[in-house]
Amino acid sequence: MRHPRIIIGGIGLAVVASVGGVTAAAAGSSPATSAPTAGHSVMAATVRTAPVTVAGKTETILVNAHGLPLYFYRPDTAAKSFVTGGLARLWPPLTSAAPTAAGASGKVTVVNDAHGRQVAYNGHLLYTFTSDHPGQVTGQGFQNFFVATPGLTPITAAAAGTGTAPAAPAGGYGY
């Protein structure tokens, strides 16, 4: 005989799922899920926004599905990552076959490069930092990496074609 709490819990989950509050994949404890928001799926986007303290100030930045801050590397171009070897072990690239965005109005794309299908935001290839935790930014300005923000200025075709780094972001946050 089944335990009554399991049956009741299963019925409750089925009811919530039937009205769009939960997807089957979100019913587990995967770190890629987040709390539901006003009629949206609970699956987290590849790139989303979050308020995080950066250099003592609360800023809205881009984070990955696990809430880790996302960074861009100033020497990169829109088509080429210069993050290799030991640097890539400290700053793992964000990769996804089909990236999605939530709360960010910029363009999310995929660049096929040495890292695989690396995610870019407004032409800037994105990375995480191994010392960070969700909601914690520790790599701002370190080794030429800067926190990516929703207002990150797009890399122009001219800058991408010349192999030159984009100008330093005003305020250091990619605005």
Image (tube, rainbow, N blue to C red):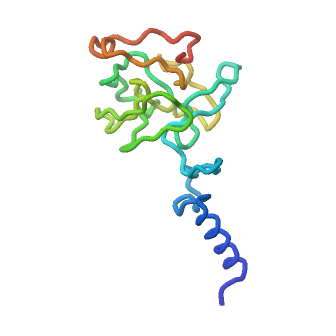
Q: Is residue 24 above or below residue 106?
A: below
Which residue is painted at 55% across and 55% down in the image? 30
Where in the figure is residue 122, as x and y percent of width and height?
A: 42, 24
Which residue is painted at 65% across and 74% down in the image? 11
Q: How many marks?
A: 0
Instruction: Give residue 54's quadrant in the image.
Output: top right
Which residue is painted at 58% across and 52% down in the image? 42
Q: Is residue 150 above or below residue 31?
A: above
Left or right of residue 84: residue 35 = right
Quadrant containing the N terminus in the rendered view: bottom right
Where in the figure is residue 47, as x and y percent of width and height?
A: 50, 37
Left or right of residue 1: residue 149 = left
Q: Seen from this angle, which residue lies furthest bottom?
A: 1
Which residue is painted at 29% across and 32% down in the image? 113
Q: Is residue 76 above or below residue 25?
A: above
Q: Nearer the viewer, residue 141 or 123?
A: 123
Where in the figure is residue 68, as x and y percent of width and height?
A: 56, 36
